[in-house]
Image (cartoon, helix red, strand yellow):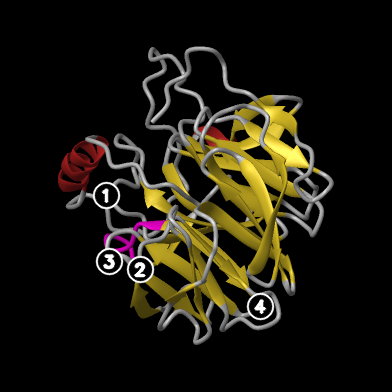
Amino acid sequence: MTRLPRRRPRALILLAAAGLLLAACSATDTTAGAGQDSAVPDPGTGHLHGLGVDPADGAVYAAGHHGVFRLDGGEALRVADRYQDTMGFTVPGPSTFLAGGHPAPAGPEARSPHLGLIRSTDAGRTWQTLSAEGEADFHSLVQAGKVLYGFDSQSGRVWAGTDGGRSWDKRAKVEAFDLAVHPDSTETVWVANGTGLQRSTDGGRTFRPVPSAPAVVAVEEPHPGRLVALTADGRTLTAEGDRRWTQVGRLPGGGEATVLTAVSARRLLAADNTDAVYESADGGRTWSALHRPTTGQEHH
């Protein structure tokens, strides 16, 4: 689930790296890691765009500009020494991650500035390209039953597929920070755009504004008929359907909220633009810190 897009000059670096490596690289395997000079201080997570829990062992993972991290004992441990810029991120099954974003500039997978859709089946240690390499920059990904939805920041469209992300149908063009899908009715899709909420009942082909919806930046439907969302100032809101919104809590850090993931109806994960990660065990009423970045860590 990934989120507030950040445009930055790094894209120029990625384009240059992709041009140099395009002739030399042809494999779709993105298993090699690193791409970071050992003499350069570790940049930390970078701005976080995705959170998830691996059902294989219950570990919490965070995806950011500088890799995918396992959160353990208050620390963010980079997986497999990889520095790829991981934007869209979701955990559809045990040890299985789906992601989009950009390769590390010096990494061997830097064939293109956009990763398309990549998949790991070993909890982020290795990755393989599934589709849309060089075309799509997925800033949000959500799996609902057999349907995978993604928001591609390059086309500005919602994409949908039913074969695990190997092929896509490009649907409505919308402004989106985050996507949510009804867990039972996968044709019902919500888009949070920071100014309100839009709903589709035809699988993302068309959207209409939800009347009187708050200005949310992240939204989830952890169980049918109940939405939970975050505003930029960190308020946690819930609604029956997408009406009658109620504030139930607030993130404690004071940063700008960016990410929300519902592990279950009551267990929520969230992050803000200080790259802190929070967890709630009561549906967003109270929150505790899982990870706070080291002082002076770079943010974007």
To which quarter of the image does residue 249 belong?
Answer: top right
Task: Give the CA separation, mark 1 to mark 3.
Answer: 15 Å
Disc 3: CA contacts within 10 A as few (<14), some (14-19) or many (>=20): some
Question: Dot 1: what SS?
Answer: loop
Task: Give the CA separation, mark 1 to mark 4.
Answer: 30 Å
Q: Is residue 136 magenta?
A: yes
Q: Which residue is mark 1?
A: 113
Q: Which residue is mark 4?
A: 145
Disc 2: CA contacts within 10 A as few (<14), some (14-19) or many (>=20): some
Residue 24 position within the rendered picture, expressed as x and y whole percent measured from the top left: 21, 49
Q: Viewer-nearest of labels 1 and 2?
A: 2
> In the rendered structure, which segment of residues is drawn in magenta?
132-138
Q: Viewer-nearest of labels 1 and 3?
A: 3
Image disc number at residue 155: 3
Task: Give the CA separation, mark 4 to mark 2.
Answer: 23 Å
Q: Which residue is mark 2?
A: 174
Q: Nearer the viewer, residue 287 or 99?
A: 287
Who's the residue at 74% across and 39% down the image? 279
Q: Viewer-nearest of labels 2 and 3?
A: 2
Who's the residue at 78% across and 43% down the image? 285
Query: Are the residues tagged 2 and 3 within 8 Å (C-beta)?
Result: no
